């Protein structure tokens, strides 16, 4: 999917990286930059990040969302959020500690217009979290999954691949519109692509892109 066909001014939308993410589980910059551009273009007012780790992606999201927006971060490790905890952005971030499905996300349906899921990656984990979070997405919101990639498939844990994100989302795409973000390890969904914005969604899918000199494919 070409994000520049979904979001006006996506290609030229500037983003600023003031501090680089730290730690092996932090979202790579090749995936962070598209996230930030989406936030700038879509201007969501209620954002949710599940699987927040040390908080570097959350800090960058807070730096690029509008002044009135609010970000909720969730992680089962009580240490999460070091990146933003002592900054001015902390007042715009609600930090929650807990495991999904245990009451940590008891928000009403449709509460968020931007959801980023980067938590457990095994098939049953991403399925559980996705089914829990999808009802929380507004009708015009966007849902993004990280690690739509084939790493870990041949390193099973208890008989299941370490990363089951692609397998599960490929199955889910039979029921709802989901696309791989070209040039990134992200997948994206919006409920409106199945109805009012269906033509825009279809136009953003990349088919017959031509040669390397002609393609619009993003290179992360």
Image: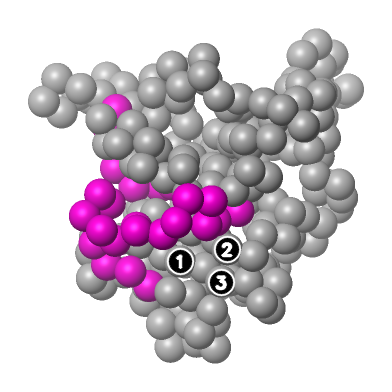
The magenta span reads 95-123
From the viewer's perspective, tell me whether residue 121 is left or right of residue 7.
left
Image quarter of residue 89 = bottom right
User: Residue shown at 88%/22% (left/top)?
Assistant: 214
Q: Which of the 4 image quarters holds residue 150? A: top left
Q: Residue at x 43, y 74 (%)?
A: 94
Determine if residue 8 is in view. yes
Image spot of residue 34 (x, y percent): 66, 48
Task: Indicate left or right for 156 with 140 as reference.
Answer: left
The residue at 39%/30% (across/down) is: 165
Query: Tag 2 or tag 3, which sits nearer the N-term?
Result: 2
Question: Of the numbered discs in the image, which one, if any, rests on residue 70?
Answer: 3
Q: Which residue is mark 2?
A: 46
Taking 164 as reference, is 30 left or right?
A: right
Q: Tell me the residue that label 1 is attached to.
A: 72
How busy is the neighbourhood of tag 2: few (under 14 within 10 Å), some, or many (20 plus)? many
- Is residue 101 found inside the magenta-colored segment of the image? yes
């Amino acid at each position: 999917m070409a994000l520049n066909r979904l979001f006006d001014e996506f290609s030229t939308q500037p983003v600023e990286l003031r501090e680089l993410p730290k730690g092996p589980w932090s979202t790579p910059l090749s995936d962070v930059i598209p996230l930030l551009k989406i936030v700038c273009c879509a201007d969501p007012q209620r954002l949710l990040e599940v699987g927040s780790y040390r908080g570097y992606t959350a800090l960058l999201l807070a730096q690029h969302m509008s002044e009135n927006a609010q970000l909720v971060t969730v992680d089962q490790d009580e240490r999460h959020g070091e990146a933003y905890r002592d900054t001015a952005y902390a007042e715009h971030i609600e930090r929650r500690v807990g495991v999904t499905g245990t009451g940590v996300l008891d928000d009403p349906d449709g509460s968020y217009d931007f959801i980023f899921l980067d938590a457990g990656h095994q098939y049953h984990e991403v399925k559980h979290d996705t089914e829990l979070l999808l009802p929380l997405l507004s009708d015009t919101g966007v849902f993004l999954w990280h690690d739509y990639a084939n790493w870990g498939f041949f390193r099973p844990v208890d008989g299941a691949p370490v990363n089951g994100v692609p397998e599960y989302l490929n199955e889910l795409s039979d029921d709802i519109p989901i696309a791989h973000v070209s040039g990134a390890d992200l997948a994206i969904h919006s409920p409106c692509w199945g109805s009012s914005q269906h033509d825009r969604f279809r136009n953003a899918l990349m088919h017959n892109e031509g040669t390397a000199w002609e393609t619009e494919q993003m290179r992360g």
